[in-house]
Amino acid sequence: MFEELGARIIDADEVARAVVEPGEPAWKEIAEEFGKEVLESGGGVNRKKLAEIVFSDEARRKKLNDITHPRIKEKIRDLLKDYEKEGAPVVMVEATLIVEGGGLRSLIEGLIVVTADEETQIERLIRDKGYSRQDAVARLGAQMPAGEKIKHGDYVIDNSGSLDETRRHVKEVWEAICS
C-alpha cells in the first residue's frame, strides 16, 4: 500500500534469501554449521528444514541470526544508499525483526509497526504461508510480542480489520510522514 503511494520498498525477506544463495559466504557458514541436511539437491538452503531446526532451538536460531543478520544489514544499507542516489523521496524497509535484532533500527529514521491480534496473525500465516498451526505459533513465539513492539513504533497500523480499514490507516501514516 505504501508502494502505491510512492514509497520505495526494501523487503528484508528478499534480502535474506539473497544472502544465503549458493556460493555466498552466509550459505557456506550455514552448510558448515547446520550440515548438508539443510541443503536442497540443487545446493540452495532448504528454508523449511532450516526453520524446523531454528524455531525449536533458541541457541540454533541465534547462531543462524549471527550468520545472516550482519550480511542482511549490509545489503540493506547498500540498497538504501542506491535509493538515496536515485533521489527516492521515501524508502521503507519491510522487516519483521527491526526491533528485536539484526541492527536494522540504526538504519531507519522512523518505525511503523504493523500489528494484528494474535489469532489473526496465526490464521494469516496458515492461509498465506501454508504453515501448520504449530509452526505459525512457533514463529510468533520467536518474535517480540506485538504489545512490546508497539512501544518502539513511531507509527502504529492495526491490521486486524478489513482491507479498507488498513488502507485508511496507511494513508494517515503516509500523510504524517510526508508532512
Image (tube, rainbow, N blue to C red):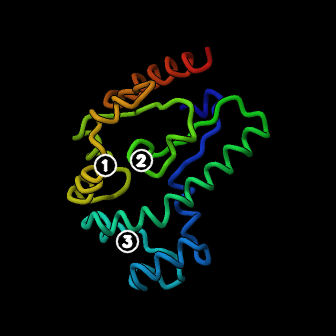
Q: Nearer the viewer, residue 144 or 116?
A: 144
Location of residue 123 in the rendering, given as x and y in whole percent from the top left corner: 27, 46
The mark found on residue 50 in the picture is 3
**Which residue is label 1 attached to?**
143
Q: Is residue 34 left or right of residue 27?
A: left
| Label 2 – label 3 distance at C-alpha | 18 Å
SS for dot 1: loop
Residue pointed to by mark 2: 97
> Counting other residues with Cα less than 10 Å from the Cα at mark 3, is it few (<14), some (14-19), or many (20 or more)?
some
Vertically, is 149 above or below 68? above
User: Which labelled disc corresponds to residue 117?
Assistant: none
Q: Nearer the viewer, mark 2 or mark 3?
A: 2
What amino acid type is highlighted by mark number 1?
Answer: Gln
Percent across and percent down for residue 133 are: 22, 55
Closer to the chain start, of discs 1 and 2, is 2
Vertical arrangement, residue 149 with respect to residue 52, above or below? above
**Residue at screen point 42% across, 49% down:** 101
Q: As shown in the figure, which amino acid type bears the numbered disc 3?
A: Leu
At a point 45% along the width and 80% down the height, the residue shown is: 39
The type of residue carrying mark 2 is Leu
Q: Residue at x 38, y 31 (%)?
A: 152
Upstream in sequence: badge 2 or badge 3: 3
Mark 1 vs mark 3: which is more N-terminal? 3
Question: Where residue 90 sits: x, y (%)?
Answer: 65, 30
Comparing 168 with 79, the one in front is: 79
Q: Residues within 10 Å of mark 2 (few under 14, many from 20)?
A: some
Question: Gap in Å between the C-alphas at discs 1 and 2?
Answer: 8 Å
